[in-house]
Image (cartoon, helix red, strand yellow):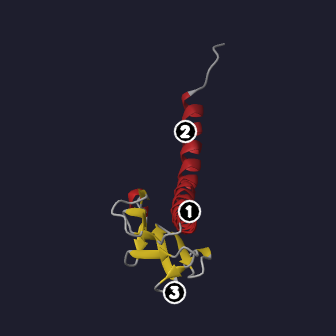
Amino acid sequence: MKSGFTLVEVALALAVAGLLLGIALPRFTAVKQELAVERAALAIAAAHRRARTLAISQGHPAILAVAERSLRITLAGEAQPHWAAPGPLEQGIALTGAPRDLTFSPLGVTTGLSNATFRLNLGAASRTVVLSRLGRLRIVRGQ
């Protein structure tokens, strides 16, 4: 007797594998989108901490520019950015609202407008990054 699988067994195995893949694939896509949006929110949070720390350590105001295509930190009076990173749009994530510049004083608080809110969306995944004037930051899911 020959060892191996019959055509019916192979076809049945492929049908079951296809069915399982069809059920699981949308969930993998949703998880991938959630992780990408979370990563973008954490990148804004990290840029916020970096700008605040830079302003305190250098004793000069630092300006954090948050836009769809880039995150930039520039020290007051300098033309070139001190630090830059790609924005959320580079990863396919929408950042709603107008680009914002947050200026951190050497004391670590932002000057000018009070709170800033950034909404990040990709598919069904969303995060809202809320930055307070006093330097507090929180990331809210699904708003």
Q: Position of residue 134 (x, y in %)?
A: 60, 81
Q: Is residue 82 left or right of residue 36?
A: left
Name the N-terminal-most of marks 1 and 2.
2
Compared with 98, 57 (above or below) is: above
User: Which of disc 1 and disc 3 is earlier in sequence?
Assistant: 1
Residue beneath label 3, please?
114
Amino acid on which disc 1 is placed: Ala
Q: Nearer the viewer, mark 1 or mark 2?
A: 1
Residue sticking out furthest to the front: 59
User: Which residue is depicted at the point 41% across and 61% down?
Assistant: 87
User: Residue at horizontal 59%, vertical 49%?
Assistant: 20
Q: Where in the figure is residue 140, as x and y percent of width and height?
A: 60, 75
Q: Amino acid at mark 2?
A: Leu
For label 1, the crowd category at 10 Å Cα-Cα, with few meaning under 14, some 14 to 19 and many 20 or more, is few
Q: Which residue is mark 2?
A: 14
The residue indicated by pointer 1 is: 46
Q: Residues within 10 Å of mark 2 (few under 14, many from 20)?
A: few
Q: Are marks 2 and 3 in contact (CB under 8 Å)?
A: no
Residue at 59 percent of width and 37 percent of height: 13
Horizontal and vertical percent for residue 74? 41, 65
Tell me if 45 is positioned left or right of 89 in this view: right
- From mark 3 to mark 1, how far is it between C-alphas? 19 Å
Left or right of 72? Residue 7 is right
Q: Amino acid at mark 3?
A: Ser
